[in-house]
């Protein structure tokens, strides 16, 4: 079922998960089928996401890097389609289909690589430098960009009100800090799903830290925390690819039927039932139903992710760069009213826009871009932390 081990020069897979890039390293490592998260060695400077049978702490699995790259491409494509979704039923249907699983896929991977998080000092340092600091930097940058593009100089800079893409960093911080709790809770997925349903039905949560979206996406993170390596083995089987074809076809047919009858706002997971004008029970049912559909489509997506090293595998380590940077281009196109051009609304125009979005986000994940923006996305910040003695997991 699995290809023979291949060598690569990718750095160790870090606990940051789906979007977080790994810092560049030098040693050559061996790829293994599916890594099982494991504890790092005492005193190790980074978290090891684990290895497969016979692997080492310095192992990266091409499957997860491939999944991260393909998912970020889908994110960029969907963002490019968003302004066109209301103008064309087929575009709306495809947009809804992709939106149903691209962020859940990222979040499941984030949860899977957060399984070892127990708030040790080195983990907290990585969480601060890899999530908190980039959030503050990019939330400020996006707000300034919005002031310029929207000609609204009075727009306040507030770290408690994430704008556009930065919500995911807030969510990742909150989810990861709760990871130790989910490991001791009985029926964690069911409990997280209840929390998501209650959030959907509650109008008083507000927009602070985008908690509505944080809570509604929470079950996917918990699924990742609970995931076992064997599950990914099953999803990567050839027979699974065969089964996914009718599933995707049916999902596309459903979204095509639903496009003029419902709203894609449900897929953003940031709105409560009060804003949508529906009863609370409908919010609960819809939350559970969408969770099941998104999880199924996420599994189908994983089934089509290549298992071997591809030309884009190394780009999987730079998806956080692509995620945070491509938003400036997406919003810039809107600020400059480029979607008002007639050619954009034609079939060749939409195809060109899709290719451009994929190409741009690919470039933004490359090593030169990572080196250029590492100060904002992956700051070292050794000066900000006290030197601490390494703590062996066995002594805790």
Image (cartoon, grey):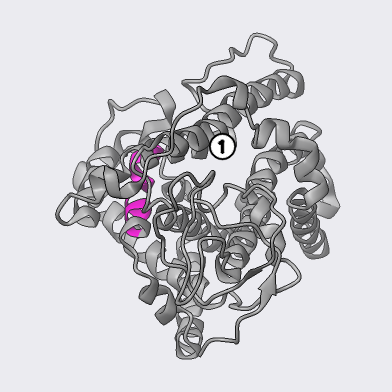
Q: x and y percent of residue 129 in the render?
A: 56, 32
215 in magenta: yes
Name the side, left or right, on which 272 lies relative to 164: left
Q: x and y percent of residue 148 in the render?
A: 76, 19
Considering every residue shown, the one lying at the far left of the view is 186
Name the side, left or right, on which 358 lies relative to 261: right
Q: Residues within 10 Å of mark 1 (few under 14, many from 20)?
A: many
Q: Is residue 339 visible?
A: no
Q: Is residue 356 above or below residue 330?
A: below
Residues drawn in magenta: 213-223
169 in magenta: no
Q: x and y percent of residue 85 in the render?
A: 62, 53
Circle 1 residue: 130
Toward the viewer: 337 or 104? 104
Q: Is residue 213 visible?
A: yes
Toward the viewer: 320 or 361? 320
Q: Quadrant of residue 271?
A: top left
Q: Main secondary structure of the magenta part?
A: helix
Name the side, left or right, on which 184 lies relative to 75: left
Which quarter of the rendered picture does the C terminus lie within? top left
Q: Is residue 2 above or below residue 168?
A: below
Toward the viewer: 53 or 250? 53
Q: Quadrant of residue 190?
A: bottom left
Toward the viewer: 283 or 89? 283
Determine the residue positioned at 19% across, 47% down: 281
Q: Secondary structure at mark 1?
A: helix
Determine the residue positioned at 65% across, 55% down: 317
Q: x and y percent of residue 31 in the render?
A: 60, 73
């Amino acid at each position: 079922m699995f290809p023979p081990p291949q060598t690569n020069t990718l750095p160790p897979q870090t606990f940051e998960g789906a979007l977080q890039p790994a810092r560049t390293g030098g040693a050559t490592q061996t790829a293994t089928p599916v890594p099982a998260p494991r504890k790092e060695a005492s005193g190790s400077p980074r978290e090891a996401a684990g290895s497969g049978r016979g692997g080492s702490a310095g192992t990266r699995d091409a499957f997860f890097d491939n999944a991260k790259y393909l998912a970020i491409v889908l994110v960029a494509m969907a963002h490019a389609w968003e302004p066109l979704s209301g103008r064309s039923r087929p575009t709306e249907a495809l947009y809804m289909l992709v939106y149903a699983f691209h962020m859940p896929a990222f979040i499941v991977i984030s949860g899977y690589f957060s399984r070892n998080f127990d708030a040790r000092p080195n983990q907290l340092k990585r969480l601060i430098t890899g999530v908190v600091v980039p959030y503050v930097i990019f939330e400020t940058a996006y707000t300034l960009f919005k002031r310029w593009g929207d000609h609204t100089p009075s727009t306040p800079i507030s770290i408690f009100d994430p704008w556009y893409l930065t919500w995911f960093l807030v969510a990742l911080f909150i989810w990861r800090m709760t990871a130790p709790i989910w490991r001791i809770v009985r029926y964690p997925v069911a409990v997280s799903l209840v929390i998501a349903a209650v959030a959907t039905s509650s109008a008083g949560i507000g927009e602070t830290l985008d908690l509505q979206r944080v809570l509604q996406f929470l079950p996917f993170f918990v699924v990742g925390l609970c995931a076992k390596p064997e599950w990914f083995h099953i999803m990567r089987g050839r027979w699974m690819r065969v089964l996914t074809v009718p599933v995707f076809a049916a999902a596309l047919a459903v979204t095509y039927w639903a496009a003029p009858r419902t709203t894609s706002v449900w897929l953003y997971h940031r709105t409560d039932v009060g804003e949508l004008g529906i009863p609370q029970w409908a919010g609960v049912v819809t939350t559970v139903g969408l969770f099941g559909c998104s999880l199924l489509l996420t599994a189908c997506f994983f089934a089509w992710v290549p298992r071997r090293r591809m030309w884009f595998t190394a780009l999987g380590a730079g998806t956080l760069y692509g995620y945070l940077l491509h938003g400036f281009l997406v919003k810039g196109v809107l600020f400059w009213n480029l979607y008002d051009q007639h050619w954009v609304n034609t079939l060749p125009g939409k195809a060109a826009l899709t290719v451009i979005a994929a190409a741009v986000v690919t470039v933004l994940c490359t090593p030169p871009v990572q080196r250029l923006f590492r100060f904002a996305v992956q700051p070292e910040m050794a000066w900000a932390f006290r030197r601490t003695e390494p703590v062996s997991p066995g002594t805790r």
